[in-house]
Image: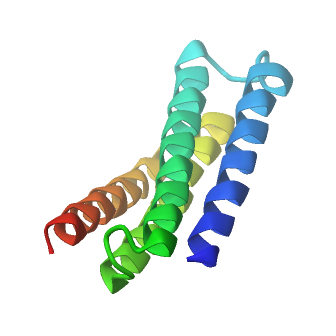
């Protein structure tokens, strides 16, 4: 599906930009190495799931697993996971607002459900 490919490409581009931004522009701005590590974790999961979106777009368009609505849902859940998981970690790393930790697991669950849907699609 073109939307999944486009989302994957845009998210991957944004992941590279945010990774470079954290490594260069924010390197000396983090309150502690702990927050730099949080930023790095956000970028890693951001990139992993951007590649997941690209893979889903390829699977969907090639009909390798069939043009399944589960694959579409998996893609949108991965996108939501990037927003909630990585997004909350980016903000936490920059602001130090620890209450954002309550949002991060929502993104993690979205990632997990997305991958479960991919597995179910493979067996369906």
Q: Would residue 88 be visible to someone looking at this image? A: no
Along the horizontal axis of the image, is 80 left or right of 7?
left
Task: Give the residue drawn at x 22%, y 62%.
Answer: 116
Task: Give the residue drawn at x 52%, y 19%.
Answer: 34
Task: Give the residue drawn at x 43%, y 65%.
Answer: 59
Q: Would residue 30 be visible to someone looking at this image? A: yes
Give 101 or 73, whichever is nearer the viewer.
73
- Residue 25 position, x and y percent, is 86, 26
- Residue 68 position, x and y percent, is 34, 82
- Residue 65 position, x and y percent, is 31, 70
Outermost residue to the left: 123
Find residue 42 and report its image quarter: top right
- The colour mode here is rainbow
Task: Give the residue drawn at x 57%, y 26%.
Answer: 35
Along the horizontal axis of the image, is 80 left or right of 20?
left
Q: Is residue 9 above or below residue 75?
A: above
Outermost residue to the bottom: 69
Give 29 or 108, whichever is nearer the viewer.
108
Q: In which quarter of the image is the N terminus?
A: bottom right
Give 29 or 67, whichever is nearer the viewer.
67
Along the horizontal axis of the image, is 110 left or right of 53?
left
Outermost residue to the right: 25
Q: Quadrant of the C terminus?
A: bottom left
- Tag count in the figure? 0
- Residue 104 position, x and y percent, is 42, 52
């Amino acid at each position: 599906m073109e939307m999944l490919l486009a989302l994957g490409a845009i998210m991957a581009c944004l992941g590279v930009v945010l990774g470079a931004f954290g490594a260069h522009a924010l390197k000396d701005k983090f309150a502690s190495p702990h927050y730099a590590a949080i930023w790095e974790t956000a970028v890693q999961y951001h990139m992993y799931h951007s590649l997941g979106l690209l893979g889903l777009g390829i699977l969907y368009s090639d009909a390798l697993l069939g043009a399944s609505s589960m694959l579409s849902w998996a893609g949108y859940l991965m996108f939501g996971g990037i927003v909630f998981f990585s997004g909350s970690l980016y903000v936490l790393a920059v602001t130090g607002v620890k209450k954002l930790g309550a949002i991060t697991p929502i993104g993690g669950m979205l990632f997990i459900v997305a991958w479960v849907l991919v597995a179910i699609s493979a067996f369906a």
